[in-house]
DNA sequence: TTATACTATGTGTATAATTCATATATAGGA
DNA sequence: TCCTATATATGAATTATACACATAGTATAA
């Protein structure tokens, strides 16, 4: 009976997590993460997918198509540049590098992110003040 | 010349803000905000739009249609209930009230939000560690 | 009594974002 | 040869968001 109860609780929590843990400021957060990773060092899509786990994105839960399209969009907007690298083993890589405009965008993102932290903290304070 | 330069800077900043300040974890944040406001006290859509400014949403920049549809969706999912209130002056209001399921959802949201604060803080640390 | 503004709730449609499935190709090892 | 890992990409479906507009009751000032 207790096990039954525990199982119900676990299921409920999982259901709610599935319901609410998508988003809440995660989607577009991908963009500043990619920019920051590229500021650390030039990289290619497949590697960036691995490195994104630094920011709480699980590599296996991600859609490569999403990442690649994101990178091509950033390139189209002049935030990064790319070149093919065929030197070493394995298939050719499209190596991305951040531009000065991309660095400015990242700086602007940090302001936004700082502001969002404050908003979220304020939210939690409000929540904990509930009777 | 200096004014010219300042103007350029202001324009650039505005352009970047327009580019990056949308999202970055704001969209779905609307949901927990509505739930929290309804936990504070039952309310209706039009009033909620006003009260959302508590969370950094400017009332005049918001899409009423978005809010109303959000509320109807939450109702469809059993997170809130509604009833028409025609008593006092002005047109009838659809008064929303949060359910126990909605309260559980809000609690789950606060876990997510706490986690997101940590992720965002970690991001800023990483940014400031850049050479 | 008319015009105007404010309160209040919605729908229709277009665009953007996201997800899921799939295609392509190179290289290494069993 | 077949399987796996690396690597990039497209197509289609679904979902989310934005923008415009429709409807209607009430108050108030001209």
Image: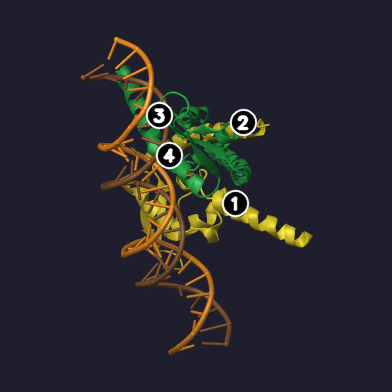
Chain colours: A green, B yellow, C orange, D brown
**Mark closer to the chain start, 4 or 3:** 4
- The answer to whether dots 1 and 4 both sit on one chain is no
Q: Which residue is denoted by mark 4 in the rendering?
A: A68
Kindly identify which chain the residue marked by label 2 belongs to: B
The reply to whether callout 3 and callout 2 are in contact (CB within 8 Å) is: no
Q: Which residue is denoted by mark 2 in the rendering?
A: B126
Residue furthest front as drawn: A87
Q: Quadrant of residue A100?
A: top right
On-image quarter of the N terminus of chain B: bottom right
Kindly identify which chain the residue marked by label 4 belongs to: A
Q: Secondary structure at mark 3?
A: loop
Is B60 located above or below residue A16 in the figure? below
Between B81 and A122, which is closer to the camera in this rendering? Answer: A122
Q: Quadrant of residue A91?
A: top left
Left or right relative to C21: residue B110: right
Between B50 and A82, which is closer to the camera in this rendering? Answer: A82
* Residue B102 x, y percent position in the rendering: 40, 41
Q: Which residue is denoted by mark 1 in the rendering?
A: B16
* Residue A61 x, y percent position in the rendering: 39, 31
**Mark closer to the chain start, 1 or 2:** 1
- What label does residue B31 carry, if any? none
- The mark lying in front, picked from 4 and 2, is 4
Kindly identify which chain the residue marked by label 1 belongs to: B
């Amino acid at each position: 009976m207790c096990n039954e109860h525990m199982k119900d609780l676990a299921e409920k929590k999982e259901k709610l997590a599935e319901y609410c843990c998508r988003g809440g400021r995660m989607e577009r957060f991908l963009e500043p993460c990619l920019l920051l990773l590229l500021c650390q060092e030039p990289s290619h899509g497949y590697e960036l997918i691995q490195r994104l786990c630094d920011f709480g994105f699980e590599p296996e839960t991600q859609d490569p198509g999403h990442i690649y399209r994101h990178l091509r969009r950033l390139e189209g907007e002049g935030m990064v540049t790319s070149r093919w690298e065929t030197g070493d083993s394995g298939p050719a890589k499209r190596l991305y590098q951040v531009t000065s405009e991309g660095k400015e965008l990242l700086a602007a993102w940090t302001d936004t992110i700082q502001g969002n932290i404050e908003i979220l903290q304020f939210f939690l304070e409000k929540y904990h003040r509930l009777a």
